[in-house]
Amino acid sequence: MKTIKLLSTIFVALSLLSACGVSKHPGRQVASFSFTDQNGDPFGTDQLTGKVWIANFIFTTCSTVCTPMSHKMADFQKTFNELGIEVEFVSFTVDPEIDTPQVLKEFVGQFSEDDSNWHLLTGYSQDAIGKLALNQFQTIVQKPQQSGQVIHGSNFYIVNQKGYIVYEVSYIEEAFEEQIFTEVKRLVK
């Protein structure tokens, strides 16, 4: 009897541990989109098809997580480039009225000298980014009228070659970097 109870406890513990870091909503496909990147060029799912990409939501006047998240995105970009692993990086602005292509170009330049595979996107309405975030990435984007700050999630999303979100992890989660590297390496084998 003790053996069965011990095995049951171990099974439950392993099940809980294996769930850590796993995408909360595996297999959601990102619907087709085309917006404007920091170079003023159209960019979207047509350019991302067949590629692994990492996405996040930021804005240039953010006073909290956006700058550190952008530093982390630049670190991912540099490391994957050094490893010869092809990954695209997509940052959706959650403040499109302020974040024009020119503003985004200056912003990304603070983090990386190479924006060839890092696309900061704008060219949509506040309502459209709110709907895209909620419907495609199941995260919130809200811009209160009385504040210059936008409420948004701090997750990184890994999207596979077929456009499915296969992994998401919060920037504030411990060991999120290792989880991202592991998942991307698994996808590009």
Image (tube, rainbow, N blue to C red):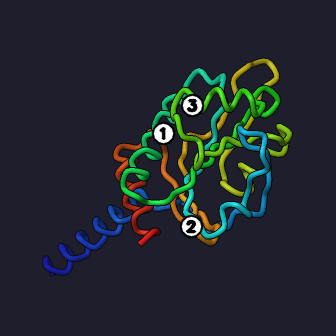
Sequence-first disc among 1 and 2: 1
Q: Residues within 10 Å of mark 1 (few under 14, many from 20)?
A: many
The image quadrant where one finds the N terminus is bottom left
Residue 31 coordinates in the image, percent (x, y) = 75, 63
Q: In the image, what residue type sits under mark 1? A: Ala
| SS under mark 1 | helix
Instruction: Indicate whether 155 appears above or below 62.
Output: below
| SS under mark 2 | loop
Q: In the image, what residue type sits under mark 2? A: Asn
What residue is shown with label 3? 66
Q: In which quarter of the image is residue 147?
A: top right
User: Disc 1 versus disc 2: distance between alpha carbons?
Assistant: 20 Å
What residue is shown with label 1? 74
Q: In which quarter of the image is residue 34?
A: bottom right
Q: Is residue 4 left or right of residue 155?
A: left
Which residue is more in the foreground, 41 or 14? 41
Q: Residue 63 carries which label?
A: none
CB contact under 8 Å: marks 2 and 3: no
The image quadrant where one finds the C terminus is bottom left
Q: Is residue 7 left or right of residue 17?
A: left
Q: In which quarter of the image is residue 144?
A: top right
User: Disc 1 versus disc 3: distance between alpha carbons?
Assistant: 12 Å
Q: Residue 160 carries which label?
A: 2
User: Residue at position x 55%, y 63% from top?
Assistant: 52
Q: How crowded is mark 2: few (under 14 residues within 10 Å), some or many (20 or more)?
A: many
CB contact under 8 Å: marks 1 and 2: no
Mark 1, mark 3: which one is toward the viewer?
A: 1
Residue 183 coordinates in the image, percent (x, y) = 42, 62
User: Disc 2 versus disc 3: distance between alpha carbons?
Assistant: 24 Å
Q: In the image, what residue type sits under mark 3? A: Cys
